[in-house]
Amino acid sequence: MSETPKKILDIKNLDISFKTNAGIVHAIRGVSLDLCKGETVAVVGESGSGKSVTMKAAMGLLDSNAIINSGEILYTYTDKDGNEVTTDLLKMSRKELRRDINGQRIAMVFQDPMTSLDPTMTIGKQIMEGMFLHKHMEKEAARKRAIELLDLVGIPEAEKRFKNYPHQLSGGMRQRVVIAIALSADPDILICDEPTTALDVTIQARILELIMDIQKKMKLSVIYITHDLGVVAKVADYVNVMYAGKIVEVGNVNEIFYEPKHPYTWGLLSSMPDLDTDDERLYSIPGSPPNLLHEPKGDAFAARNQFAMAIDEKEEPPMFQVSRTHFAATWLLHPDAPKVEMPVELKTRIERAQKEVAKYL
Amino acid sequence: MSEPLLKVENLKQHFRISRSYTVKAVNGVSFEIYPGETYGLVGESGSGKTTIGRSIIRLYNPTEGKIIFDGMDITGKLEGKTRETLRENMQMIFQDPMASLNPRKKVSDIIGEGLDIHHRYKSREDRAEQISAMLRKVGLSPEHASRYPHQFSGGQRQRVGIARALIMNPKLIIADECISALDVSIQAQVVNLMKDIQEETSCAYLFIAHDLSMVKYISDRIGVLHLGYLVEAGTKEEIFSNPVHPYTKSLLSAIPHPNPEVEKRRKSIAYDHASSGIDYAKGTEHNVGGTHTVLATDEEFDKWVNLR
């Protein structure tokens, strides 16, 4: 594959509010992100930053109190006649999405395998469900394919397990089944919403390696939604850092981890415990995320930002370009801004990380 | 060395499910906690770490073994006096701050419940004073006292949980996965708070978690638990710089590093107990050096030590 990768999903200026008893919550405030074929994009942020809502919008799974103010989600695919088609997913009705997109072209893996499986159905049946619905497969063929999928996701003795119920499996095995279901209709895009948060560290590593493996085999494009930067470092090609309904920094994974520009990204990276140092204190971002019930004035991160300037209170920073792929929304990058470096602790940590890389090359 | 604050000897906790089936959650675990230190207990889900915490605070009745707290034996039937001292000096912080706070009680009553039960105040003003002092200590403001749990964010709620545990001025706090339900940036805040409080009050922590990287930050000594056995124990330096047991190694290798270039090339070490042929029941405690011990048979021990 020498050609430049094709854009498969392109979210443009998405803006979503929720109507609640307390008032209008402006949850997504102009989000743009794109995904190219075969790549992995991670969306990182704290809970309430809007990362899940963005992806739910693409799947048409938004709650009924959601109002889409503006934006489009362009999805490009090849239809059965081999023509390339681009559609706006936001313009499709729920029914159309259900019939043509969900599961078939864009599949999702949810956080908790306990609640996303049907406890009254055998796992085999749950895997075949999608094949009957989307591919109109014969029962025998579907059964064969389901067993293949169970093999693919690393469940031993697939034939025997086929008749098991979810409660007979461990948490890690259940998440493997969920992945098998997501893959059952050969989707183009796999959205993983915190796929390993409910799992143990040892199993987390194995599930992530499994998804990476399958991605290579099936040439999938994957979107990860997570708050764990360690997971991001392992799997992602590109990273979008989200804060208060906005993407504040985007870049490829090396740019985000080795040359972060936004103070929020600095904070996130610094608050990760580091195994190589014996620091007495862990850095923590002061305060908590803003309540989006009240529209933040200026930069939403200003109140928690020790580098905040006067302009941060007045005006929202635009995206400044750092390199071809790297953008960050902070006034610190404005040519007139004073020169501010990332905190020293983070800098030494990154330098050490880069030295460590040399050992692996 | 001073006397240990808590001494757990050969603790076994079995749950009889039916006549023919007993879950052996904890199988002979021994460790000690000294005053003012933090002992980290790590392991995957189902390894028995929460059960140990609950047996120590006597939410369960231990099947076998001895728990000695501050010189008192707290196994078996508790005498009235022992029970009272135990309840005053040992407190617990739970995993889910949403589920462990009574939604119908005000924060002041949640925090003050211990004071009420043990009559630890002279007047109403004294009670209110103690509660607001505690709220300030955990980084909340005294005005928060009249609010209800749902009016707080997750991190703030966990601070209320910590305040509730601290108000009795306990000698030992059992923190059961108290940060796993929180966001990364909030986790750091809570861990720092717990460290500050320890410096101030010199209470000891039993810190139960599955996240080794956080455990490293807060603990002085660490015990690694698997399937109800303590497979490896030692100071955090000993465990992190020189893991011996294959399970500990796989746990350490599973921690993702925030370093993409390394992380993309590294594969974690898998450990499959069923196929490894290791029988924990046959192992005995072997000393690796210092306070570092590992559960192994003689042959396994030789093999693992020579491996490094």
Image (cartoon, coloured by chain):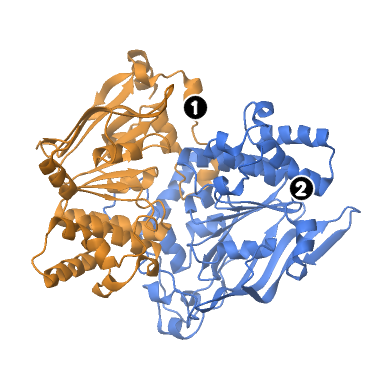
Chain colours: A blue, B orange
Q: Residues within 10 Å of mark 2 (few under 14, many from 20)?
A: few
Which marked residue is nearer to the observer: mark 1 or mark 2? 1
Q: Residue A361, percent across and down?
A: 53, 41
SS at mark 1 in the image: loop
Amino acid on which disc 1 is placed? Asp
Residue A94 seen in render: yes
Tag 2 residue: A1
Q: In the visual, does A72 lie left or right of A344?
A: right
Please report, as a chain letter, where disc 2 is located: A
Tell if the residue under mark 1 belongs to the same chain as the one under mark 2.
Answer: no
Q: Which residue: 13% across, 46% down?
A: B85
Residue A346 seen in render: no
Q: In the visual, does B46 lie left or right of A53?
A: left
Q: Which residue: 46% across, 41% down?
A: A201
Amino acid on which disc 2 is placed? Met
Q: In the visual, does A29 lie left or right of A48?
A: right
Q: Residue A354, percent across and down?
A: 46, 50
Location of residue A160 (image quadrant):
top right
Q: Residue A70, percent across and down?
A: 67, 77
In this picture, is A99 found above or below B24?
Answer: below
Q: Which mark is residue B272?
A: 1
Q: Nearer the viewer, residue B41 or A233?
A: B41
Q: CA distance from mark 1 to mark 2?
A: 37 Å
- Residue pushed farthest right? A81
In this picture, is A116 found above or below A92?
Answer: above
Q: Nearer the viewer, residue A138 or B272?
A: A138
Q: Residue A349, percent across and down?
A: 39, 53
